[in-house]
Amino acid sequence: MKTLRHLRSIYAATLFFSVLSATAQTAAPAHLKFDFGAAPAKSGATRVAPNAVYSDATGYGYEPGAQVSTGDSGNATTSDRPFLFSARVPEGNYTVTVGFGDSSAATTTTVKAESGRLMLERVDLPAGQVVERSFTLNVRTPNLPRLPTNATGREVVTLDSFDNGNTRDWDNKLTLEFVSPHAALRSIEIVSAPTTPTVFLAGDSTVTDRDAGGDVSWGQMLPRFLKTGVAVSNQAQSGETLKSFANSLRLDKILSQMKRGDYLFIQFTHNDSKANWPQTYVEPETTYKAYLKVYIAEARLRGATPVLVTAMDRGARGSGAPTHGHGGYPQAMREVAQEEHVALIDLYAMSDAFYAAAGSDASKILADGTHSTAYGGYEFAKCIVMGIKQNKLDLARFIVDDFKDFNPAHPDSYAALNLGVLFNSTPAVREPRGTATPTPPPTANPPASNPGLGPL
């Protein structure tokens, strides 16, 4: 109890900063409209030409590498390759409405946001059909509220080399990615949504957004399964532990934005268990449980709902068989959930059931024994959604209508989902822009060269 009281005292003042952020950092509501046709833009909208490359001067445009052109008789912008469009906005939640469709050709469109968050999956439209689809999205920067005079502390999240893998999560823009064999983008509308609930994700590389690459987490897949009206703010990052997440001010960033009705999903284990990382190691029966209780207490102070998620098991390279490699950490988290009366999603148990039931697909769940492929991340996200339903969280009312109850002992097949094409066909150029300029990694916790139980 002494350890817990000491840890709680470290963050006692953050409630003040949460209130401060609601006032000092409140920006004017944004309402932006973009028209992607060749004709003069509709009233109140800005026409976006195919050669409009993003610049801070205009505040909108395509990211470098986009290969787009006018199509559908001048009514849309088309491309057969993934491309990115950005608009500069203050940090916060936004409802985004995208209009697409072609009068003479069928289209299938997937929309991702920021650093690879799956928002809309394969919207199929026959020729001649034009629709609008909406989703709610979170945008953030590394900045924290200004400190009062003479108060100690820092005002910027300590970004490290791993943040280079998801710079779009930390810049001052809202970025959308369109993946389609024949995109037909007609309009985008962006409207501030400050009162919508936010689902904050705190965790490591198995949860973080991934801008590109062979691994895709459940955290970046989760938005696909939630309706408009709730935003996912995935602030997990590679290499993080309960300790380092707090020390780098990532927890402070979440707390500064948190409001009543929000959620905090907490998944840490993969790196916390590394005893050869002495500055960030936590022992399962003592300090691991104590730090979890601090996160829980801080969320509750702000009227948010904490949710504990046991880390998925590792899988043997090549076969995908479960390794049962997390020792006492999953059980310690289960005990904390009971002691604190907190909702628990036992992803560890679900993952073992998934690995055992996947058959020949088991080796395709994980990219390297720890990090999931797009297939694995998608199925793990379904596990999270089932956990939301089984815990009867109010968040369950935002689950999309096409979600069917998921049993990890009866997973989807790799071939049926065919997700690789959506996450491997990434734009050729992804230059970091905006305010996210990572600082050098802390010498006490260097990146992947650290020894330990598997990759970060």
Image (tube, grey):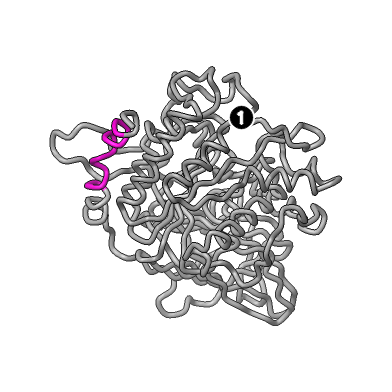
Q: Spot the residue most to the right.
A: 360
Residue toward you, 272 or 349 = 349
Classed neighbour count for the residue bearing mark 1: other residues with Cα under 10 Å, few (<14), some (14–19), many (≥20): few
Whole-percent x and y of residue 244? 43, 30
The residue identified by callout 1 is 327
Q: Main secondary structure of the magenta part?
A: helix
Task: Label 1, secondary structure: give it.
Answer: loop
Q: Is residue 308 magenta?
A: no
Quarter placement of the C terminus: top right
Quarter placement of the N terminus: top left
- Residue beneath the point at 60% across and 76% down: 75
Query: Left of 254 or right of it: where is 125?
Result: right
Which corner quadrant of the image does residue 305 belong to? bottom left
Residue toward you, 132 or 431 = 132
Q: Is residue 89 visible?
A: yes
Q: Is residue 8 magenta?
A: yes
Residue toward you, 284 or 231 = 284
- Residue beneath the point at 49% across and 37% down: 163
The amino acid on which the numbered mark 1 sits, given as a three-letter code, is Gly
Number of marks present in the image shown: 1
Identify the magenta region.
Answer: 5-17
Q: Is residue 455 above or below residue 372?
A: above
Whole-percent x and y of residue 81? 69, 56
Query: Left of 222 or right of it: where is 129?
Result: right
- Residue beneath the point at 64% across and 56% down: 382
Q: Is residue 51 visible?
A: no
Whole-percent x and y of residue 218? 61, 49
